[in-house]
Image: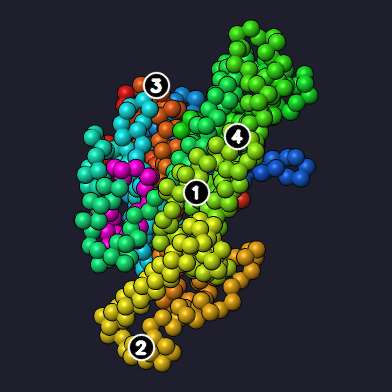
Amino acid sequence: MIAILVQIVESEKLTSVVWNHFEKVNVNGEDKAECRYCKKKLGANNIRQQVIGMGQKTTDGQTNLSCLNFDPEKSRKDIAEMVIVHEYPLVMVEHHGFRKFMVGLQPLFKVPSRNTLKNDILKIYDFEKEKTMRLLEKIRSKIAITTDMWTSSNQKKGFMSITSHLIDDNWEMQSRIMRFIYVPCPHTAEVLADVLYESLCDWNIDRKISTVTVDNCSTNDLMIHLLLDKLSLNSLILGGELFHMRCCAHILNLIVQDGLSVIGDGIERIRDSVYFWSATQKRIEKFEEAARHLAIDCSKKLSLDCKTRWNSTYLMLSVAIVYKDVFKCLKQRETQYRSLPTDRDWELASSICGKLQLFYKVTLMFSGTRNPTANVFFPSICEIRIALSRWSEDRDELIKAMGERMLVKFDKYWSVIHGVMGVAVVLDPRYKFKMMEYAFPKIYGFEKSDVEIVKLKELVSRLFQDYETCSYESSQNRDVDSSRNTSDMEVEGGITSELDHYLQEKVRTQNSELDILSWWKTNGFKYPTLQKIARDILAIPISTVASESAFSTSGRLQLVHKSPKHIVKASNMTVMILTSNWGSQLFDDGGGVVDVTWKLELWKNDFVYES
């Protein structure tokens, strides 16, 4: 049984809510407050300092009461964090049911109004932003940027998400959403470049940027060109030569979509079937009943795909194939169902799912944010290139046509490999140049592969020299005597001796598990310059998924809070997304930190809900 105390007002009238739980009694001429549950008596003067709030079960099932100190400020902060993490509407704290629950749980706690809650969240926002800015300010390595645009479905407003990526001093990957900002129309390259540059300057990282990863479109190409004109080229890696990164996940999407267009009719019939049987709850129940009748496990739910996202099409097909007999059965019982896929459709769908599983695995790998992705690029696309060549020779004409179509698209986008991917593989002690000697002939052909390997070796050498020069100039600015290091490099064969030594070392077994960040952290004493390069290059993401994740949160905020009273303003949404992202360890329930690294900056300027 739980006994809860509240502050007693010093007056004759027993108006405090505490008397819902206590009786005023006189003991030997002295006023006491007797708990109605445990009959414990407390002096009236002591009630202000005590809270009886926790019931603990003993081994015999009885409840013991223990005295606890209650901190209302901490509880207010907990509510603010709860709203941020779970994206609740602010007005929730004014709901009668919530207030009744809180009074029963802790009468001492005064539930804040939504305006007070707004201010509490802004305090967390300011604290987390300052902490994130300190992180970016003190970091000694380069910072990679991903950015993407999104248009809200209900408000038709465009938003830009800007995310920073780096490897911290503990050699752990860090991602922070810096801005989630409303961008007025028109969304031209000039407008986007100005917004991005202004954000980089606001965070004082315009001279720390390594690359910018964007989707593959002409507007982004021009935006990057304009952004380079605004930035100091001397601060960029190789003068900005590696600055522009194209999202590999987006390119994979374009390749697969081109292939799927060859067999569009068969997929369309399956899509129509999934739509029909998932359109209403009644149809869903009828579909599940038919599945149980056929002894088919119906734990997997039918899900309609998004036509522009091939991975959702893959997931839709993989589930629909399980229920192909259910669709056939229901065709006999439902006259309105007219889009039954043919046996040929199911045969193609099964074959496609088996082949697209590789693309799905690679997409998930490219989309990771917890581990480096640039170093896994070459092994993955080499596997894809081999698979596409095999598909283009398939006996099935449709599969062959699909493979040929995808192969053309592959060569269009990846006939020239970005230098970052090549350098990242060389910096992986399992691969070095051995991977290039295996992969380049499969990607470029034997005639061109030797030329491309020479180009990559020259790039790695120039990059090493660029970092070596920067390190030397930095030591001179700090009045550090670097003559010994310079002399050692000359004796050992020139400025690339450290690089030569690394490349001459035996490669690790490719199948071995390797934490590449830990490897470079512990081997920095052997390769100090290469360690700096690895820290900058391995932090570069090869997809924009980290920025797109903010759109998932913003979409949910708009979908969940549909009523006029709960509509989220653009500024509110920003604060929610950014605060949750910066405070990615807000909750720790003892079993681990809840990761909310994909949500904060829209509420800052106008942090209220419209009413």
* Label 4 packing within 10 angstroms: few (<14), some (14-19), many (20+): few
* Label 2 packing within 10 angstroms: few (<14), some (14-19), many (20+): few
Q: Residue at x 50, y 39 (%)?
A: 405
Name the foreground residue: 456 vs 547: 456
The residue where tag 1 is placed is 367
Q: Residue at x 40, y 29 (%)?
A: 558
Quadrant location, the N terminus: top right
The answer to which of marks 3 and 4 sits earlier in the sequence is: 4
The residue where tag 2 is placed is 486
Residue 356 vertical placement versus 535 (above, below): above
Q: Where residue 119 sits: x, y (%)?
A: 33, 40
> To which quarter of the image does residue 346 belong?
top right
Which numbered circle lies on residue 397? 4
Answer whether residue 600 is visible to the viewer in this image: no
Q: Amino acid at mark 3?
A: Ser
* Residue situated furthest top in the rendering: 335
Q: Amino acid at mark 2?
A: Thr
The answer to which of marks 4 and 2 sits earlier in the sequence is: 4
Which numbered circle lies on residue 69? none
The residue where tag 3 is placed is 563
Name the foreground residue: 436 vs 228: 436
Q: Residue at x 32, y 28 (%)?
A: 156
The answer to which of marks 3 and 2 sits earlier in the sequence is: 2
Q: CA distance from mark 1 to mark 2?
A: 41 Å
